[in-house]
Image (spheres, rainbow, N blue to C red):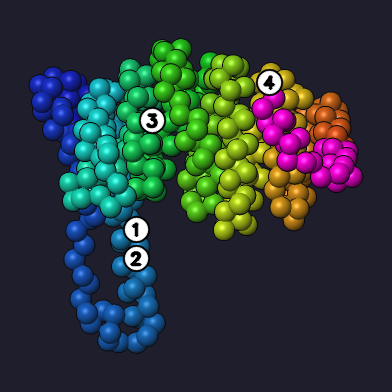
Amino acid sequence: QLTAGLFTSLPEADREHLLTALCESRRHALLLLPPPVELLTRGHPAMRANAGRNIMRALAAATSSAEAALQATLAALPLAAPMFVRRLDAALAATAGAGEGADEGAAAAIAGCTATLEVLVRRTPLPEPAEQLARPLFGLLAALDRRSEYATQLVLTSVTAMLRAAQPGSAGAAVGGAAVAAALVEHFNARLLFAQLVDPERPQVAKHALEVVKAAVPLLPEETLERVVPHFASVSRRALQHEHHGAALAAVERAVGVLVPLLVRRGLQLRPLLRGWVTLVLQAPPAQWPALLGALVGKASSDEHLHCVVSSLLVAHSLRAAQAAAPPAREADLLRLASS
C-alpha cells in the first residue's frame, strides 16, 4: 500500500513518475473481457435479460471501485502544487501557438493535460502552495479555448475551486488564502471569461465560466470590476447577434440574473452599472427585451435598483422619441459633430 510516509520518502523523480502513472491511469479504460456469447444469445429471453443486467452491474461496480481507489490514493498522497505546475507548463508549451487543427504532438499534449486536470480536480484540498497553479491554469484557459471543450471545463472547474478556497472564512479555505487570492487576481482573464460565459455554442463552458466569475466577484478589486464590466456588456451584445440567438439569449439572461445583484452588493455604483445593462437590453432585438428585462429586475436588490432600471428605460424612450422627431442631420452638421 502506498502511504503518505512512503511517498514522501521517495526521491523526487520517483514521486514525479507516480504522479505520471496516476494521470495516465485516467487515459486508459478498464480492460474488460467480453462475456461468453451464449449468455446473451441462448436460453430463455428472461435469462438473457438477467445476464445482461448482471454484466452491467459488474461493469458499474468495477468502474466505481477503480474511481474509489484513485480518490483514496489522491487523498492519501501529499501531492504538491509544483508537481502539477510542471505538467501543466509542459502542456502549455506544447499547445502554445498551435491552431485549431493541432498536429499529433499538440493533440497528445492536450490529452495528457486533460488527464492531469482530471487528477487535479479530484484533489481535495488543493495541492500547496495553491497560488502557483493560477498562472498555468489561466494560460491553459486561453490556449485550450476552442481546442478542447472538455479540457476547458476542467480548467474552469479548477479555477472555481481555487476562488472558493481563497474566500476568507470559507469551508475548505486554502492555507495561505490571501496569496491564492492575489495570484488569481493577477492572472484573472476577465475578457476571455466574459466571452465564454455568453458563448451560445458551448452551453457547458458558459455555465462553468459563470461559476468562475460568480466566485471571483467578491475577490476582485472594485476598480477592476468597474473596468471589466463594460466589456461584458459588449460581448453580450455580440452574442445576441449570433445565429444561435436562442442559446445566446439564455446565456446572457442567466449571466445578467446572477451577476448584476452580486455586482451591486459588491459596491459598484448602481446607476452607471444598471444604465449600461439597460443599454444592452435596448440594443438587443425587441423580441428579446422581455427576457432580458426580467433577468435584470427579477432579482432587484432594492427599490433603488428597480427605480434606476425604470428611469433608465424612460430616459432611453424619450431620447428615441426625440431622435425620431428631429429633422435629418445635414452632412456638414455630421462632420462638425464628428470633429468635436
**Residue 138, numbered circle:** 3
Mark 3 → mark 4, Cα distance in angstroms: 25 Å
Mark 3 or mark 4, which has the lower sequence index? 3
Q: Which residue is mark 1?
A: 60
Q: Quadrant of the C terminus?
A: top right
Q: Which residue is mark 2?
A: 56
Type of amino acid under label 2: Met
Type of amino acid under label 1: Ala
**Residue 330, numbered circle:** none
Q: Position of residue 281 (x, y in %)?
A: 72, 43
Name the residue at 43% across, 31% down.
159
- Tell me the SS state at disc 1: helix
Image depth: mark 1 or mark 3 in front: 3
Name the residue at 32% across, 28% down.
136
Mark 1 → mark 3, Cα distance in angstroms: 35 Å
Nearest the eye: 297 or 315 = 315
Are dots 1 and 3 in contact, CB under 8 Å? no
Residue 102, relative to residue 185: is it above or below? below
> In the figure, is residue 176 to the left or right of 200?
left
Type of amino acid under label 3: Phe
Q: Is residue 339 magenta?
A: yes
Mark 3 or mark 2, which has the lower sequence index? 2
Q: Quadrant of the N terminus?
A: top left
Mark 4 → mark 1, Cα distance in angstroms: 50 Å
- Tell me the SS state at disc 4: loop
Please identify the quarter of the rendering in which residue 113 is found. Answer: top left
**Residue 268, numbered circle:** 4
Q: Position of residue 324 (x, y in %)?
A: 85, 46
Type of amino acid under label 4: Leu
Range covered by the magenta-colored residues:
316-340
Image depth: mark 2 or mark 4 in front: 4
Q: Position of residue 84 (x, y in %)?
A: 26, 29
